[in-house]
Image (spheres, rainbow, N blue to C red):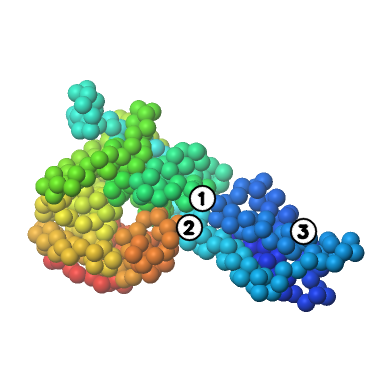
Amino acid sequence: MSPWEILAVLSTAVLALVRWFPAGVRRPVALAAAAVAVVVTAILVVSGLRWQLVPVLAGTAIALPFAVVPVLRQRAGQRPRRVRWWLALPGTAAMLALISVGPLAAWALPTPVFPAPSGPYAVGTTVLEWTDPERPEPFTADPGDRRTVPVQLWYPAQAGQAKAARSFQGARTAQEARDVQNALADSFGIPRFLASDVTSARTAAVFDAPVVEDSGKFPVIVFSPGLSGVRTSNIVLAQEWASRGYVVATLDHPYDSALTSTGGKPVRSRNQDAVTGDPEKDRRAVKANVDVRAADIRFVLSQLERLDRGEVTGPAAGFLDTRRAAAVGHSRGGAAALAAAQDTRFRAVINIDGGLRDAGVRPFPQPALAITSPVSVRENADFVSDLDDVLTAGSATSYRLSIPDTGHLSFTDAALYFPPLPSLLGTVGRTEGLRVTAEATTAFLDSALRGRSGDPAEQLRAHGDLTVHE
């Protein structure tokens, strides 16, 4: 909460309690608290009132007359009328309960604060849109419609860019961020206003910042978000990897992502329509979804190769080492990353808490890292066995890392603003799951793509419970 918001809570609480103050101080305290409450309310309304403060201001409106009117009557020489204590006591308790809703809501659903990337590079970002002329769009009936994939690049940038150019939750404008967040709220089935503060959060990334030119070429990460997720669902990880010298391509999967835009037209998710209740149809739908995502991942790698050769435009052209590429994803995107690893252009693959049930993932030759949360493992009896079957069948050493006290959303930006419930985030806190995930994945990628010395298993064990598949 901001200082003004804290002052609003305190002044309103004093108004609710002033009836119980000693008679000698009741008048000056009531007038001072009323003056502060009125001024702070005006400041909050003008500067932009957060919905979390609405219960506090409602409490101010209710408590103000009960606190001030008796004082004004006394000042006018009239006898103040006071509510009997046995009526005032439950009223005061109800007022304090109403006021406490504000701080509780601000704690449970805060405005996210993106942690500063820890690497040596500043971070730039840009959005590209690529159409695959060889692949029909599977979600439309138009035979001439071709699959278009929006991609956001996060890359090492030159330092000293203007802070005013930092993105709004990964978007160029607050309105664009608001549209995406509303669509995500709809997909989660929650009221839009509960996540309205998210769109005011600024990231560390600056749109279209010049790429660092004195550090050679950078390895590539192609990232697929979870079901209904968007290219800005995992900004913390994308920025962290970019600050450490990777070019990260985060994907929107049209008709899967909650909201994206292709050809200037908004495209919404059809995931809700895909759930039929028929087990066999739903299994086929999962497999089809993973296959489309995996094809998107492979296509984006091909486009990154063209970008590096200068065949398509972009700020990182000529600075991509696509021979050192990794497919990475969270949840359904993690399963898609493993499926995309059939393409041997990828030299490493990471699945972040992605279940493989009905995904149809086959063994692959690259080293892999699978990160799991205890919550996901408890909720799905086949979660670990499915992962181990695939990792064991591969032809390279792979790792499964269980990060203690995490939940499924601990690995996404939702951890910064969702209620910290154990079923969602575990008990690791809002930022610790993201920090540990960044450290573990970077250690694995540095070994697999950069040939950094040191035993990956030893480095990974520092972050959780590790199983090694030779």
Q: Position of residue 223 (x, y in %)?
A: 30, 48
Residue 35 is labelled as: 3
Spatial separation of the CA atoms under disc 2 and disc 1: 9 Å
Q: Residues within 10 Å of mark 2 (few under 14, many from 20)?
A: many
* Residue at position x 76%, y 68% in the image: 82
* Residue at position x 65%, y 48% in the image: 45
Identify the secondary structure beneath mark 2: loop
Q: Position of residue 435 (x, y in %)?
A: 39, 63
Residue 228 is labelled as: none
Q: Amino acid at mark 3?
A: Ala
Q: Amino acid at mark 2?
A: Leu
* Residue at position x 61%, y 70% in the image: 90
Left or right, 35 with reference to 280: right
- Relative to the observer, which residue lies in front, 117 or 291? 291
| Residue identified by numbered label 2 | 109
Left or right, 253 with reference to 193: left
Q: Quadrant of residue 322?
A: top left
On screen, residue 462 above or below 305: below
Identify the secondary structure beneath mark 1: helix
| Residue identified by numbered label 1 | 197
Q: Position of residue 394 (x, y in %)?
A: 11, 58
The quarter of the image holding the N terminus is bottom right
Spatial separation of the CA atoms under disc 3 and disc 2: 29 Å
Q: Are marks 3 and 2 in contact (CB under 8 Å)?
A: no
Which one is earlier in the sequence, the residue at label 2 or at label 1? 2
Q: Position of residue 88 (x, y in %)?
A: 67, 70
On screen, residue 333 above or below 429: above
- Relative to the observer, which residue lies in front, 372 or 394? 372
Which one is earlier in the sequence, the residue at label 1 or at label 3? 3
Q: Quadrant of residue 453?
A: bottom left
Residue 447 seen: no
